[in-house]
Image: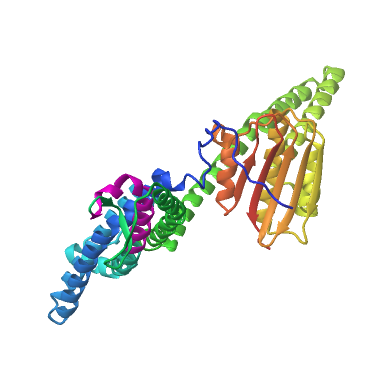
Amino acid sequence: MALAYGPGTGRPRRAPRLPARLGVPLTARTWREFGHLVLGLPLSLAYFALTVTALAVGTGLVVTFVGIPVLALALAMCRGIGAVERARARALLDVRVGAPEPVGAEPGTGLTGAMWAVLKSGASWRHVLYALLHMPWAVCAFSLAVTFWSLAWGLVTYPLWQWTLPVGVGVHGIQVYGDGVRAYVLDSPGELAVTSLAGLVLLFPAAWLVRGLASVDRAMVRGLLGPSRLANRVVELESDRGVVVDTAAADLRRIERDLHDGAQARLVALAMDLGLAREKAAEDPDAAARMVQEAHDEVKLALRELRDLARGIHPAILTDRGLDAALSSVASRCAVPVTVSVDLPSRPAAAIEGIAYFTVSELLQNVSKHARARHATVNVWRTGDRLLIQVTDDGHGGADPAHGTGLAGLAERLDAVDGVLAVRSPGGGPTTVTAELPWRA
């Protein structure tokens, strides 16, 4: 089943005056990227010279132990170069790369500990690699970008500056051919138009060449000057752990509140009613019987509340019969008719199955409360190593995770297990919410 992930409702964007491809040479982005490539050559030459000099001096002096601090200073200098390059990429390439992980010196080790931490840091050596590799690439990128970009714009604007090139008496322009007897100069109106047209044709591949060269710079900045994948994963897991802890604490508070305000209060009232019935049993058996009957009704209500509470913690039908039966049970309690389709070759892990159940349950609650829909569908299937859940309704639409806590909280809970939530809900409907979960058997 094909999915169409699209943006939610928002302010309509103004239609561009020129088609996107035709306007590439004139966009600010292309000119910023060209400026980045031009500025990259002198900076990379300076980086390369400083890095090679510092590494050579430090390596040569290692036998005297003076080289170790020099190498540490060289690596620290390269980290400073990385900070400059990240700022330059942010300003000219519109790429935002976070700072790498800190060197992590042990507390109390002083200057020696900081020096060894810099030397052992993989991020520091990635910065050295960037300073060494970027110089030859910058020479190549500068040569290609300046040559083709300048040639294209020079030909396009040739009619404006051709008169500044005196070739002979009364002749101005570029001399294409000359043998001492005859000379062919681009100076007639027709030749000026053809030259300008040729520059215009060359301008578009030159612009895309600039963008392609700049994309290589983006890749180098992201790959060598940012946090490592391991560091990013650690940060992501720490954030996910915080979400899981907060969600568990909120669930415990909800269970405690439901017990205190619901079943516990009913059981306290039930105990009081049974005590009064026992006192009246001898003097007024009929009143005692009525009180016992009322207490019996209260027991039924308390049992129903406890069953609902247990279903909210983990439904027994999910454990016993699987996701298909459990989702059908949830759909039967929805305020609108729901069609459920579950196509799974086997049962996923219990944790993933539980998250899928509560995801559908919360989405159907949103349909019942907010969508004003007449019908909803739930589809669950497996694609590769992902479990996909799609809930669609024909309501009025307009659902946006950015303007509510329900969908935003659900997205956070899915993200905690490497899941994804995508919402497509244009004004007027329909609304399609797709959740992806990792398949774990």
**What residue is at 27 percent from the left and 61 percent from the top?**
41
Q: Is residue 89 visible?
A: no
Against 299, residue 314 (above or below) is: below
Q: Nearer the viewer, residue 251 or 367?
A: 367
Q: Nearer the viewer, residue 303 or 162?
A: 162
Q: Nearer the viewer, residue 17 or 167?
A: 167
Q: Is residue 73 left or right of residue 402?
A: left
**What residue is at 25 percent from the left and 63 percent from the top?**
78
Residue 57, by quadrant, is bottom left
Q: Position of residue 377 (x, y in %)?
A: 78, 41
Overall secondary structure of the magenta stretch?
A: helix
Against 135, residue 56 (above or below) is: below
**What residue is at 65 percent from the left and 48 percent from the top?**
435
Q: Position of residue 140 (x, y in %)?
A: 34, 66
Against 142, residue 299 (above or below) is: above
Q: Nearer the viewer, residue 317 or 50?
A: 50
> Residue pushed farthest bottom?
63
**What residue is at 61 percent from the left and 46 percent from the top?**
421
**Image label count:** 0
> Residue pushed farthest front?
181
- Image quadrant occupied by the C terminus: bottom right
Residue 97 on the magenta span: no
Magenta region, residue range: 142-168
Q: Position of residue 317 (x, y in %)?
A: 78, 49
